[in-house]
Image (cartoon, helix red, strand yellow):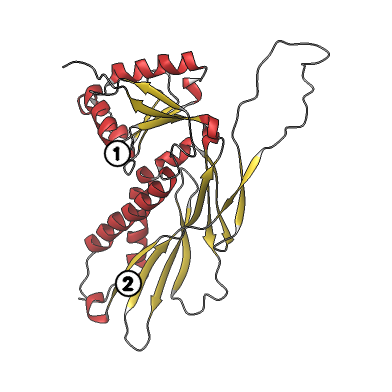
Amino acid sequence: MPPTNTNVALQLYSDRFIATLQPGIALLRAFSTNLSDEFSRPGDTVRVPLVTPDTASEWNKVSNNYVRSITDLKDRPVKLNKRPITGFAIDQNQLHNFTPNYWEGKGVLNAGEIALYIVRKVTDIVTPANYGEEMVAKLAGFNRKKVAELRALLVKRGMKPELSALCLNPDMYSALLADLEFYVMGNQQPIATGVIERLLGFRTIVDLPTYTGNGFVCYPDAILAAARRIEVADTTPYKSFGSIVEPNTGLALNRVILTNGPTGETSFSVESLFGCEVGNPDALVRLVETATPDPE
């Protein structure tokens, strides 16, 4: 058997990596982000704009017309202080025997690890200390009716569901999927991507695979996230030093092949440089279970 072409193998790995990464980081679209394939260094700070609506009011030919004031672009600094990396190494003998299924399988598994790391770090900041607002609701037996009840409670609080993301822990999201019977209806997207669009007036409903609370409802400016490609001084030692860009969010990751000359071992790595911070603490409401759940 001829040796594996590392460029072909890397492409197989990258294709499966991106395909698996997409649903894993879908929740980032619910927040304010500044994601780019520009180069940066760990510890650098990126300004992330707060995505907020402009208030609508009645037309006035003097004070409220086609001539608008220059927008006050509010943004916040986010430090790029998180750098997850995953990968593996193979020796020369293994290089002769690995099949395409191996490279595709590694791409799936490693993308899942990066995605889980990012999601965990983002949702870790959703704490009572950072977001003091909470909404008590009957969450036991979560289903489509519960989503409608949450919507009604939010409207009474003055929040706009059509601008909000409803973010749920895995148990609640899975229960909602079962109630909606997506398999029966033939719509696989919410299962594959972890996102339900425009259900009962919410902008989006998102699965939080690492979140230990019930969930939360937020506007985009509640959480800020930023990411860049990692800058290195010299790429000469590497067989390949490129990037992968997830198209839905713009999240860029470094993709590196490094061969150790003395041993002949070749290492394949993917890494991310990102950061996340609290944005507007008043733009997120945590869901808290009522003390008297629904009767059986």
Q: Residue at x 38, y 48 (%)?
A: 120
Which of 179 and 136 lies nearest the eye of the viewer?
136
Q: Residue at x 65, y 24 (%)?
A: 54
Where does the image place residue 181, in percent across and percent down from the top left?
22, 24
- Give the position of the C terminus as an image quadrant: top left
Where does the image place residue 161, in percent across and percent down from the top left?
46, 21
Tell me if mark 1 has few (under 14), some (14-19) or many (20+) residues whose alpha carbon lies within 10 angstroms of its own.
Answer: few
Where does the image place residue 96, in percent across and percent down from the top left?
23, 76
Q: Secondary structure at mark 1?
A: helix
Q: Is residue 285 visible?
A: yes
- Give the position of the N terminus as an image quadrant: bottom left
In front: label 2 or label 1? 1
Q: Is residue 185 above or below residue 83?
A: above
Return the residue at label 2.
5
Where does the image place residue 253, in percent across and percent down from the top left?
46, 58
Which of 91 and 54 lies nearest the eye of the viewer?
54
Cα–Cα span, label 2 and label 1: 31 Å
Return the residue at label 1.
192
Q: Secondary structure at mark 2?
A: loop
Q: Which mark is residue 46?
A: none
Q: Residue at x 47, y 15 (%)?
A: 155
